[in-house]
Image: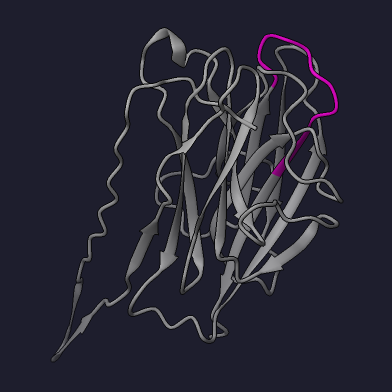
Amino acid sequence: MFKGFVRRAAAVKALAVGAVLAIAVPGTAYANTVGVTVKTPGATAGPGSTFSEISTHADCAGGLISGGGINQAIGTGSSSNGNHVNGTGPSSDGSTKYLGSTGVVGTDVTHWLAIGGGGGATNETYAYAVCSGAGINVGGATVTVRNSEASGPNTATSGQTVTVGCGGNDGKLVSGGAAISSGDVTGTDFTGPGSGGDHLNGSYPSDADGNPVADGTTTASYWTAYTHTGGAGSSGNHSDAWALCANDGV
C-alpha cells in the first residue's frame, strides 16, 4: 500500500458549480441542464511506511462515472520526496481493479480507485470521482470499460507506454485511467510495484500510437498510460491503461 509521510493537516473542499449555457437559435432558447457531482471520501492516511503503497476510492451513489482523480497531500518539505502516483482508474467494486482478459472488462462503472506510492516518507492520499448529476438521463447510456496491459518497465531509468481505444460500437471516449503494479490484470489485484521508485508519469487522451491529442480535438478515442521505474531496477511490473467509452444509443 502507498504511504504518505506529511503530518501536516490537510483540508480539502470540493465545490460543485452549476453552469447554464444558453444557445441562441432563431426564436428559441435552449438551456444546458447537464450537471456533475464530485465525490471524495476525504483523506486516507498513507502510505504509512516507507517504500509502500495505499489504495483508496471514491464512489457514485447515483449516476455513472465520467472520470476521476488522485491527490497526494505531500507538501514541499523533505518528507515529500519520493511520494508519487502509482495508479488512477476505474474499479468494479471500489476496492479492486478490473480483472480478466484485456479488452472489454466492465460496463457502467461507479467506482474510482486512487493508488498512492511512498518513497522515504508517509503521507495522505485523496480519491475523486466525477459522477453524472441532475439533468443527465443515463437510463439509455452505457459506459464501456476497455483495458490494455503490457509487461514492464523493469530496467532502471526506463519507461513503458500502453494505449487502449474505444471499439466501433462503444461510443465516445469520455475518460481513462492508468497504473503500474506488480500484478497482471488477468487475475491479480493491485500490488506494490517491484521498486519504491516505480511511478506513473502520464495518463492522457491520445492517438493510436500513444501521442497526446492536440488542443481542441473532438475525435479522441484512445487513452495512454506512461509508466517509469525511476533510478532503480525493478521486477515483475505490469502497466495498465483503461478507456471509458460512452454510448447513448443515438
Viewer-closest of 56 and 28:
56
Q: Which residues are magenta?
A: 229-240
Residue 238 magenta-highlighted = yes
Residue 230 magenta-highlighted = yes
Position of residue 79 relative to residue 109, above or below, is above
Q: What color scheme is it? A: one colour
Viewer-closest of 209 and 83:
83
Q: Residue at x 33, y 77 (%)?
A: 134
> Looking at the picture, how far across and down is residue 135, in whole percent?
33, 80
> Looking at the picture, how far across and down is residue 37, in whole percent?
35, 63
- The image quadrant that residue 239 belongs to is top right
> Looking at the picture, how far across and down is residue 90, in whole percent?
61, 55
Position of residue 4 relative to residue 233, above or below, is below
Q: Residue at x 49, y 56 (%)?
A: 67
> Looking at the picture, how far across and down is residue 183, in whole percent?
81, 39
Q: Main secondary structure of the magenta part?
A: loop
User: In this rendering, would 50 be left or right of 217?
Assistant: right
Q: Residue at x 78, y 44 (%)?
A: 149
Numbered circles on residues, count: 0
Viewer-closest of 145 and 195:
195
Q: Residue placed farthest to the left in the image?
A: 27
Position of residue 8 relative to residue 169, above or below, is above
Image quarter hosting the N terminus: top right
Position of residue 108 relative to residue 125, above or below, is below
- The image quadrant that residue 146 belongs to is bottom right
User: In this rendering, would 8 be left or right of 199?
Assistant: left
